[in-house]
Structures are given as structure tokens and as C-alpha cells.
């Protein structure tokens, strides 16, 4: 009560009405009267009203604290951001913005990244009450954070502000000279979507900083529109490895013949991920012109690349790939990876199944016309035996394993003698 006696008599009467009256209209009138006062008693009474049982009283007290524009109200309003009722949370967040001090604005910025969804929604709602420039200034701090946080928050922002205004706010952030803000804005563009977002992300695919180019590539990959094929073909020659991998992975998802030659060239990149995605993309395109390059990729040092090449050859289904696939299965020492051997076996099965009708055709129909009309030359009228007799004086060829064992013994004997 010491605080009450230090203030004027009118403030004391308003505080008593707020605390003791049973009528809602009287209490709301007392809150409105206290908002025009400047004193510790009025501030204490309004802060205590934030914990009232009545929702209307709590929301009115939060708005009154914002009208007072006293920095001492930041603490109680921060607590009110976690209220159970959305209207109270919105009033508290808006009151913090009306206070306008650096402390109050820092509380709103911190609330944007809060783990409590209620606090985060209240802070996001305040963006709808700002101008585009001020909203961009608030988002600048948020867009420096982690990608998962940005994408979660931007989903709510897009719902509250709308697609058009959100893009306008992000366009202001994209002008920043700091790369972390541009990167966060590009990630946020992916949450908004639309043709405008694609066009702006394509511009930042050529940004000076590699982090921004990576964010643009990942965002465009998630959008997945066909108009990104040509820019991603150019991105295969980017200086950053992550951008090249994203470009190859994205091109592998499309069956566009424009990516045929770039993907054939990407099979010779040093990056194993790029080679793997290039082989997968060639398999989806299904052009027989890629058979020779994929057969050569069966001898790659990386097992994932060999497996992707075998699967791609199975998707293409051309008989010219059968010798290379069978060569990988001839000896177990040629291909040690079981996944690659299985992929080769499945590719052979698919090719033979797809081309079985060619075998079933007669000779005149299966061969080309100019060769089918030629007579077959007869070398001898005597039929050849199924098994040729072996002469008695023919030298016996040793087994390969025996020759290798003799060579090892000879070298071991020479080493022991010396």
C-alpha cells in the first residue's frame, strides 16, 4: 500500500475499482483510466491485471501497458506472451511493439524463434501490424538462424501476411549485403512458392557467395519446376561442389533430353555424387546414345556409380549393353560388390525380357533386308562332329591356377637362394 499512498488520489480510486469491482464495465473503465496515468501504482495494477481470471481484462490490461509506453512493462508483457488465449498474446506482442524501445523489440525478435508455439504465433502476428520495411528489419535477425527454424516460421508468416506481401518483405531482405540474410531469404522463398519466388531464386543462383547459391539450388530443387532445367545445366559447371551435386540430382529427376549431353559429360566429374546422379538421370531419359558411356561407367571406382550405371542400362533396355553387363558377372573377382552384381543381373533380365521378341523373329525378318537376301555360303558338305577328337601328341595346357602356383614357387625359390 506504500506505492498507492505515494501516488495521487485518482489513481488510488482507479486501482481499487479494478481490484474490487464485480462489474466488467467498471473494471474496463478503470483500466482505460490507468492507461492515461504515469506512475508506479498504475503500472503495478495493470501488471497484476495480466493474471486476472477474465480474458477481456487481461487483454485490456496488455493494451493499456502498451499505451503507457513504459519500459518497466516489458517484463510482465513478456510473460503475457505465453497466455493460454490468443487474443491476450496478440495484445501483449502489440504492446511490446508500441513501447518501441530496444529492449521491447529484442523481446519480440527472440519470441519469433521461441520453442513455445503460442509465443511464436503471437510474435508473428505483430508482423501483420507493421510496414514492409519494419517487418523486413524484424525478419533480418530471424533469417540468420537455422534452416529448419526459418522454414517453420515462414510457413506461418506466409499464412498471416499472404503470398504477395511476404514476397515484398523478403525482397527487401534480399538487398542486404550480408550473405546470411540473403541465404535465409532464399530459403524463405521456397516456403512461399509461386512464379515470383522461382524467378528471384534463379537470380541468386549466380550469387557471389557459395552459401547463397547452395540455398537457391536447394530451394529450386524443392519447388521442382521444369523451367529450372536450363539454369541447372549451367550450374553443373559451378565452382562449388554442393551446387553441382544439387544440380545433377535435380536434373536426374526430369526425363528431359536437353540434359542428355550435360549428364554424359558429368559422368567424368571427379565428384562421385555427381557421377552417380548423372547415371541415374541418363537412365530416366532412356536414350540409347548413353549406352556406351554407361557401359564405361560400369568400371568406375565407386560402387554406387557402378550400381546406378547398371540400373540405368536396365532402364534403357538396349541389347548393346549385355556384353558389358555379363562381363561384370563372369568372375566374382571382377565385381566384388553384391549390390552391383544384383543390379547387373536385374538389368540383364530386363533387357532380355524386353528384347525377347527380336530373338523369336525368323532370320529373314530379324536381319536387315540387304543381308537377309544374300545366300549363305556352304564351306563343306561334310557335317562337322559335335566334339573334335584331341590328338594323342597334343600338349596339355596347364590350368591358370597351376601356372600361378608355379610362378609363386619359382619366385620363392629364387628369394631363398639369394
Image: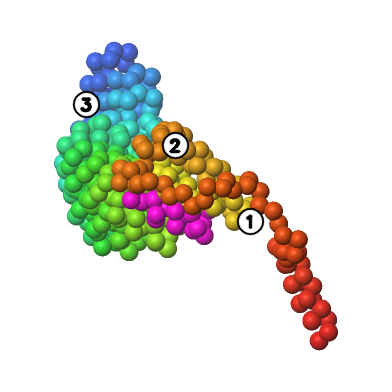
Element class at badge 3: helix
Q: Is residue 38 visible?
A: no
Q: Does the magenta-highlighted stretch encompass residue 292?
A: yes
- Vertical relation: 60 (above or below) 250: above
Q: Nearer the viewer, mark 2 or mark 3?
A: 2
Q: Position of residue 81 (x, y in %)?
A: 35, 33
Instruction: Decide if residue 246 is on the left or right side of residue 158.
Output: right
Tell me the element at label 1: loop
The reply to whether callout 2 and callout 3 are in contact (CB within 8 Å) is no
Position of residue 238 in the picture relative to residue 390 (left or right) = left
Sequence-wise, which precedes: disc 1 or disc 3? 3
Q: Earlier in the sequence, mark 2 or mark 3?
A: 3
Q: Kindly report the distance in space between the C-alpha atoms of the residues bearing marks 1 and 3.
A: 88 Å
Q: Are marks 1 and 3 in contact (CB under 8 Å)?
A: no
With 206 as the anchor, is 252 left or right in this view? right
Neighbor class of circle 2 (other Cα within 10 Å; few <14, some 14-19, many 20+) is few
Q: Which residue is mark 2?
A: 359
Query: What separation in Å lies between label 2 and label 3 (alpha carbons)?
Result: 93 Å
User: Taken as a whole, is the magenta stretch helix, strand or loop?
Assistant: helix
Rendered residue at 59%/48% (across/down): 384
> Which residue, given by chain and number where applicable, does mark 1 sit on?
333
Q: Which residues are magenta?
A: 287-303
| Residue that mark 3 sits on | 32
> Image quarter for residue 368?
top left
Amino acid at each position: 500500500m506504500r506505492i498507492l499512498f505515494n501516488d495521487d488520489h485518482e489513481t488510488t480510486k482507479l486501482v481499487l475499482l479494478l481490484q474490487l469491482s464485480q462489474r466488467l464495465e467498471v473494471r474496463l473503465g478503470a483500466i482505460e483510466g490507468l492507461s492515461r496515468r504515469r506512475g508506479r501504482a498504475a503500472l503495478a495494477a495493470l501488471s497484476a491485471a495480466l493474471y486476472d481470471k477474465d480474458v477481456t481484462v487481461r487483454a485490456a490490461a496488455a493494451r493499456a501497458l502498451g499505451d503507457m509506453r513504459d519500459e518497466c512493462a516489458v517484463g510482465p508483457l513478456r510473460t503475457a506472451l505465453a497466455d493460454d488465449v490468443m487474443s491476450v498474446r496478440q495484445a501483449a506482442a502489440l504492446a511490446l511493439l508500441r513501447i518501441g524501445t530496444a529492449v521491447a523489440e529484442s523481446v519480440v525478435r527472440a519470441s519469433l524463434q521461441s520453442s513455445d508455439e503460442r509465443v511464436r504465433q503471437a510474435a508473428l502476428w505483430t508482423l501483420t501490424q507493421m510496414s514492409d520495411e519494419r517487418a523486413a528489419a524484424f525478419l533480418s535477425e530471424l533469417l540468420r538462424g537455422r534452416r529448419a527454424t526459418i522454414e517453420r516460421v515462414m510457413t506461418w508468416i506466409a499464412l498471416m501476411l499472404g503470398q504477395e506481401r511476404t514476397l515484398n518483405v523478403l525482397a527487401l531482405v534480399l538487398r542486404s549485403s550480408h550473405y546470411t540474410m540473403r541465404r535465409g531469404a532464399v530459403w524463405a522463398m521456397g516456403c512461399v512458392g509461386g512464379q515470383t519466388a522461382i524467378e528471384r531464386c534463379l537470380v541468386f543462383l549466380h550469387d557471389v557467395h557459395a552459401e547463397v547459391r547452395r540455398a537457391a539450388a536447394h530451394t529450386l530443387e524443392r519447388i521442382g519446376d521444369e523451367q529450372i532445367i536450363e539454369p541447372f545445366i549451367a550450374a553443373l559447371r559451378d565452382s562449388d561442389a554442393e551446387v553441382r551435386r544439387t544440380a545433377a540430382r535435380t536434373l536426374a529427376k526430369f526425363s528431359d533430353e536437353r540434359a542428355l549431353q550435360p549428364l554424359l559429360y558429368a559422368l567424368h566429374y571427379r565428384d562421385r555424387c555427381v557421377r552417380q546422379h548423372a547415371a541415374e538421370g541418363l537412365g530416366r531419359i532412356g536414350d540409347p546414345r548413353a549406352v556406351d558411356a554407361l557401359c564405361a561407367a560400369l568400371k568406375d571406382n565407386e560402387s554406387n556409380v557402378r550400381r546406378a550405371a547398371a540400373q540405368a542400362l536396365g532402364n534403357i533396355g538396349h541389347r548393346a549393353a549385355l556384353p558389358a553387363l555379363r562381363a561384370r558377372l563372369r568372375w566374382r573377382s571382377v565385381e566384388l560388390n553384391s549390390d552391383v552384381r544384383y543390379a547387373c543381373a536385374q538389368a540383364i533380365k530386363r533387357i532380355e525380357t524386353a528384347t525377347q521378341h527380336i530373338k523369336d523373329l525368323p532370320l529373314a525378318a530379324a536381319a536387315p533386308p540387304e543381308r537377309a537376301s544374300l545366300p549363305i555360303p556352304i564351306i563343306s558338305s561334310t557335317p562337322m562332329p559335335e566334339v573334335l577328337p584331341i590328338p594323342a601328341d597334343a600338349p596339355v595346357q596347364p590350368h591358370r591356377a597351376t601356372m600361378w602356383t608355379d610362378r609363386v614357387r619359382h619366385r620363392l625359390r629364387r628369394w631363398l637362394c639369394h
